[in-house]
Image (cartoon, helix red, strand yellow):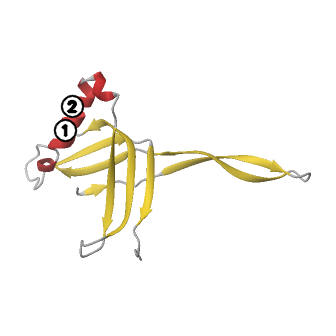
């Protein structure tokens, strides 16, 4: 992968009134992540392209979303700082690489809907 767009999670809260003074506490109700957008070289995009085409052309495949994990590695690539696990991934847009002359590496952008993200820090990560 050459780029991952920023990840945003929107949280909804409601006021939970307590006591006779009508003060309130905020209570989390739900959270929802934005789409996962990645950019990668066209030469590495075959698996994503196959998944996207199957997902768009086969109604049964569309009913079976995937999950995936993104690991942030230490500079020496020997261990993981933390992991993000994505659930219910469903591709809905894939860009076509540009045919303009002078482009050194042709890149593809994949946009996937995502229903959940879980964060896990690695033991000893600092």
Residue 123: give x, y in percent of width and height: 41, 72
| Left-right relation of 33 to 43 | right
Residue appearing at x 45%, y 53% in the figure: 118
Instruction: Please report contact status of discs 1 and 2: CB closer than 8 Å, yes or no.
Output: yes
For the residue pair 22 and 97, the one nearer the viewer reads as 22
Quarter containing the C terminus:
bottom left
Q: Residue 53 carries which label?
A: 2
Residue 74: give x, y in percent of width and height: 30, 73
Residue 55: give x, y in percent of width and height: 27, 30
Q: What element carries label 2?
A: helix
| Left-right relation of 13 to 92 | right
The image quadrant of residue 88 is top left
Sort mark 2 into few (<14), some (14-19) or many (20+) by Cα contacts within 10 Å: some
Residue 24: give x, y in percent of width and height: 79, 52
Can residue 97 be seen from the camera position used here?
Answer: no
Q: Is mark 1 on a helix, strand or loop?
A: helix
| Left-right relation of 103 to 35 | left
Q: Which residue lies furthest to the front in this view?
A: 123
- Distance from disc 1 to disc 2, alpha carbons, whole Å, reads 6 Å
For the residue pair 90 and 7, the one nearer the viewer reads as 90
Q: Mark 1 sits on what residue? A: 49
The image quadrant of residue 53 is top left
Residue appearing at x 25%, y 23% in the figure: 58
Quarter containing the N terminus:
bottom left
Q: Which residue lies furthest to the top in this view?
A: 59
Residue appearing at x 26%, y 27% in the figure: 56
């Amino acid at each position: 992968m050459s780029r991952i767009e920023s990840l945003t999670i929107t949280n909804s809260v409601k006021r939970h009134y307590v006591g006779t003074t009508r003060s309130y506490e905020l209570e989390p109700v739900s959270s929802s992540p934005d789409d996962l957008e990645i950019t990668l070289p066209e030469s590495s995009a075959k698996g994503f392209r196959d998944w996207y085409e199957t997902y768009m052309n086969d109604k049964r495949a569309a009913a079976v979303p995937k999950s995936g994990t993104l690991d942030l590695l230490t500079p020496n690539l020997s261990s993981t700082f933390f992991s993000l696990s994505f659930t219910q991934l469903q591709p809905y847009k894939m860009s076509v690489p540009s045919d303009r002359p002078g482009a050194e590496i042709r890149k593809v952008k994949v946009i996937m809907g995502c229903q959940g993200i879980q964060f896990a820090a690695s033991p000893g990560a600092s």
